[in-house]
Image (cartoon, rainbow, N blue to C red):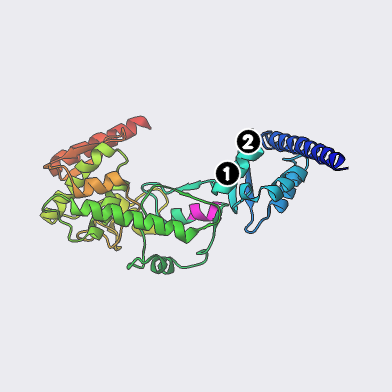
Amino acid sequence: MFRKLIVFITFMVIISLAGAGVLVYKFDKVLNAPLTIQQDHFLTVSPGSSISAFAKKLERKGWLPTRFWLRNYGRLFPQKTNIKAGTYLVTKGTTLQELLAQLDMGKEHQFSVTFIEGTRFKDALAILAKHPNITQSISGKKISEMAKTLGIKSANPEGWLFPDTYAFTAGTLDITLLQRAYRNMQTQLNTLWENRAKNLPYKTPYQALIMASIIEKETSYIAEQPVISSVFVNRLRKGMRLQTDPTVIYGLGDRYQGDITRAHLREKTLYNTYRINGLPPTPIAMAGLSALKATLNPETTDYFYFVSGGNGQHVFSKTLAEHNRAVRDYLRKQRKAK
């Protein structure tokens, strides 16, 4: 009797081991098979999702032929199926095991937005509003209210966003990205201010930010920015007006339709540097790093004037007579081109 019991127990152990081997083999096969997707997809996992609900979701999407194996794998090995909420990019050829590892690490997809040098605060708002993966929290608010939320003392936050590419995960608040861009600008500006050239005509970092925005709008040709900066420094030191078109355009707002008229130049707005002395009250655009550097470390020149050379660069002059000749040459080139 005892001998028969030993034989029975041995037989059951062999059967169990064989079954376990089959189970391990099946799990391994399912985990290492590519998901049935033909292209890259985004997958959003809701907070509190169980492995059972997750398996059902994959089955419904057609990524798994059946949820049976994943659901039971999760029951047997819960430590290996610790999925985190978020939005993930699942690429073609990804296996179930790779997807589980991605979710276990919480390696969410990084979306991005780019704020471009020379654009305005309202342009940044438009970019954020259009992005489908950004949660809107400031739509309908006044610009002054946004400035207050960001901690900007001026009611006009123009120029306080640093133009750069900002990565984020799905569901990030629009105000969060604005705060990051604002902090970035503060850091860049303060660092450059501490290392600025001596005897500049700017009393505060904010005044330097205003000038950097003007330089940014005057040219995208980085090599010229320190030279243009020197022109404005020379004019400010001599008490001359800046007489720069981009500030006039900013002051016109929506009234600007592509051309500056003589009437526009005569109109006295806070931003018409043909009529006001010194700097306008705020920046007029987002200044990039090169414009900030050029503002706080300009070249040393004797130039007081510049005009477009018609080739994306400028012609610089020391005297008004030289400048007038350069303007005539530019206008002559324009007529020929037409």
Q: Position of residue 214 (x, y in %)?
A: 28, 51
Residue at position x 70%, y 45% in the image: 73
Left or right, 35 with reference to 115? right
- 23 displayed left or right of 204: right
**Residue 271 magenta-highlighted:** no
Residue topped by disc 2:
94
Main SS of the magenta part reads: helix
Distance between the Cα atoms at labels 1 and 2?
Answer: 10 Å
When the figure is inspected, residue 149 is found, relative to residue 201, above or below; the finding is below
The residue to which callout 1 is attached is 102
Residue type at numbered disc 1: Gln
Q: Indicate the position of residue 5 as horizontal and vertical percent values.
A: 85, 42
| Spot occupied by residue 184 in the image (x, y as percentages of width and height) | 34, 54
Using the rendered view, name the quadrant where residue 220 is placed. top left
Q: Quadrant of the N terminus?
A: top right
At a point 21% along the width and 54% down the height, the residue shown is: 193
At a point 65% along the width and 50% down the height, the residue shown is 78
- Report whether 209 appears left or right of 178: left
Q: Which residues are magenta?
A: 126-131
Give percent across and percent down for residue 206: 25, 60
Q: Residue at x 59, y 52 (%)?
A: 84
Q: Is residue 47 above or below residue 302?
A: below
Q: Element type at marker 1?
A: helix
Tell which residue pokes out farthest to the right in this image.
1
